[in-house]
Amino acid sequence: MNAASQRPQAHPYVAVDVVVFTIDAGQLKALLVRVRDGPLGGRWAFPGGFVGLDESPDAAAERELRENAGVVDVYLEQLYTFGGPDRDPVSRVVSVAYLALQQHKARVRRPSNKYADIGLFHVRHLPTLAYDHTRIARMALARLRSKLEYTNIVYNLLSRTFTLGELQVIYEAILGRSLDRRNFRRKLLSLGLLKRVAGVRRGKHRPAALYAFCRRRPMIIGML
């Protein structure tokens, strides 16, 4: 170790941490990775890493998901900046946290060598998280629930076609409570967000009509 590396850190490093939510078997789950090395080795955390000199935080978040967690094609928005002096036991790090949504069940692939493991966890039963990621998790869930009330953000968790029942399951999974079926459908159809498409979904009960969003882009609505 040279003399320069022994000097105190003069400025914080800038990092990103990404909370990826997905729906799996009707449950809202978050993607976590297991820290491989260091004083927090073995603990679970959200995927993330340092921002490169030649990239924006948004680009860094997309790169970290793609290269180290195998996650692509997600909705991504900045959540909050976390900069507590003691949030990282190794270095002084300021992190830009992100909320990400992936359609249906996330494809959980083998992580890069950066992580020891990767997995999906129910948002109500997350393990003890490294760093300040428990706080990040709470804020990300609160943001998602809030946006569910006044935007059409839910389309990012659905395939192109779906039933009204499948859509209600996602709302209930995120909100953590049941919704009246008749009122939910009446309100939803009155907003003009959905269109009926050809085909039905067959299952245990009678065939269910299929719908699609008229526009798959962010919009302000009065949903709840």
Image (spheres, rainbow, N blue to C red):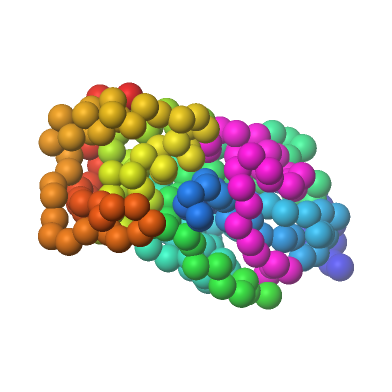
Residue depicted at 57% across the width and 50% down the height: 30
- Extent of the magenta region: 114-141
143, above or below 7, in the image: above
Q: Residue 149: which quarter of the image? A: top left
From the viewer's perspective, tell me whether residue 146 is left or right of residue 190: right
Residue 66 at x, y percent in the picture: 48, 68
Answer whether residue 83 is visible to the viewer in this image.
no
Left or right: 125 as drawn, with respect to 86: left
Q: Quadrant of the N terminus?
A: bottom right
Please indicate whether residue 75 sits to the left or right of residue 208 in the image: right
Task: Give the residue drawn at x 45%, y 36%.
Answer: 172
- Residue 190 pos. (x, y %): 15, 30
Asked whether residue 224 is in view, the answer is: yes
Count how many numbered circles sit on residues in the image: 0
Where residue 113 sits: x, y (%)?
68, 75
**Which of the pair 183/3 is nearer the observer?**
183
The quarter of the rendered structure image containing the C terminus is: top left
Quick check: is 127 in the magenta stretch?
Answer: yes
Residue 18, placed above or below residue 174:
below
Q: Residue at x 42, y 65 (%)?
A: 72
Residue closer to the observer: 120 or 135: 120
- Point 48% across, 40% down: residue: 173
Instruction: Decide whether residue 71 is among the magenta residues.
Output: no
